[in-house]
Image: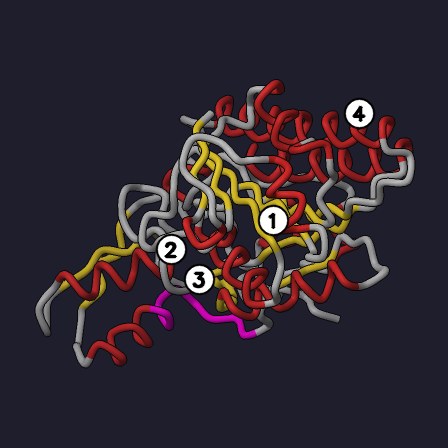
Amino acid sequence: MAIFLSPHVGFIAGGPDSNLLSNVVKNMKTALVLGAGGFIGSHMVKRLKSEGCYVCGVDLKYPEFSVSLADEFVIADLRDFAETNRIIRKDGVPFDEIYQFAADMGGAGYAFSGDHDADIMQNSVAINLNVLRSIRDLNQEFPGNKTRIFYSSSACVYPRGNQSDPNNPNCSEASAYPADPDSEYGWEKLFSERLFFAYSRNYGIPVRIARFHNIFGPEGAWRGGKEKAPAAICRKVAEVDDGDTIEIWGDGKQTRSFLYIDECIEATRRLMKSDFQGPINIGSEEMVTINQLVDTVASVAGKKVTVKHIDGLQGVRGRNSDNA
């Protein structure tokens, strides 16, 4: 486990002075962001810092497109219980809030191919179990501890049969049962929701859960196989000349809604401040086809492109956030 401490806090790389850390944060709200090297996690770090929090970020890697604003950034593998436990009980003082974004995930080409199902399920469940076990054990030492933890679930939990009509998908929160997600990624997310709620009931851990719907924005992955549809389409349009052709998986009539990252972070913060546990959708109700998304991107780029529809993974036919 490697630790980077921001120089403006007065630390040097290699490990904190716990007494100094206690003095720094004793009058500040403290937050732990797991998956802080990823797209949503890195934006949450920025938001929490703007609110005056002391933030510790954790991931296997640093953010790819910017320098983390976390006061402390720990490079660690949360699949390892010993590492997770050291982070959760850092300096023997519980964090005020924990944001659990860490997971094995990616776009359709990664999550829906079937080639990575075992890794996706094992890695993500191991992380969630380690985090919850660590908090449970810490609470036994600090009976009054009320660290609030957020878990980021996904719209992929919804039954495939509810999303077969591209013009009329049913993604209300209650429609998740009877369960029939269209991917093992969705099954893992649904199981982990239940895991967090079970630990909340049995061990008194305050949890908040939201199901994210296709979050996009600056500093998201745009190549490498794990990028989501908006970034992939932006890349394809950017890489061709005006009048050229791009390839799109499927007929392009499949529907989705896309939520800008700032709105996702705002909604997550509101949920954390509320008394509602969830699960609740965090997404946009502005449903578009993939063909419409291509037209929008091409228009912004000032290009005309021709679409060649090819066989490929496309997930469910219709999905839209139900925000009722």
At a point 69% along the width and 35% down the height, the residue shown is 192
Camera-near label (1 vs 2) is: 2
Which residue in the structure is indicated by mark 1? 154
Q: Position of residue 276 (x, y in %)?
A: 83, 59
Q: Secondary structure at mark 2?
A: loop
Q: 264 and 227: which one is in front?
A: 264
Above-or-below relation of 223 to 200: below
Q: Which mark is residue 220?
A: 2
Q: 251 and 235: which one is in front?
A: 235
At a point 43% along the width and 48% down the height, the residue shown is 6
Label 3, label 1: how far apart the Cα atoms are: 14 Å
At a point 60% along the width and 55% down the height, the residue shown is 212
Q: In which image quadrant can residue 248 be found?
A: bottom left
Q: Amino acid at mark 2?
A: Gly
Which residue in the structure is indicated by mark 4? 137
Label 3, label 4: how far apart the Cα atoms are: 36 Å
At a point 75% along the width and 71% down the height, the residue shown is 324
Q: How did the renderer colour the structure? A: secondary structure
Camera-near label (2 vs 4) is: 4
Total number of numbered discs in the rendering: 4
Q: Amino acid at mark 1?
A: Ser
Q: 157 and 58: which one is in front?
A: 58
Q: Residues within 10 Å of mark 4 (few under 14, many from 20)?
A: some
Mark 3 and 2 residues: CB-CB less than 8 Å, in contact? Answer: yes
Per the rendered image, the range of residues in magenta is: 286-293
Which residue in the structure is indicated by mark 3? 216
Q: Position of residue 261 (x, y in %)?
A: 49, 65
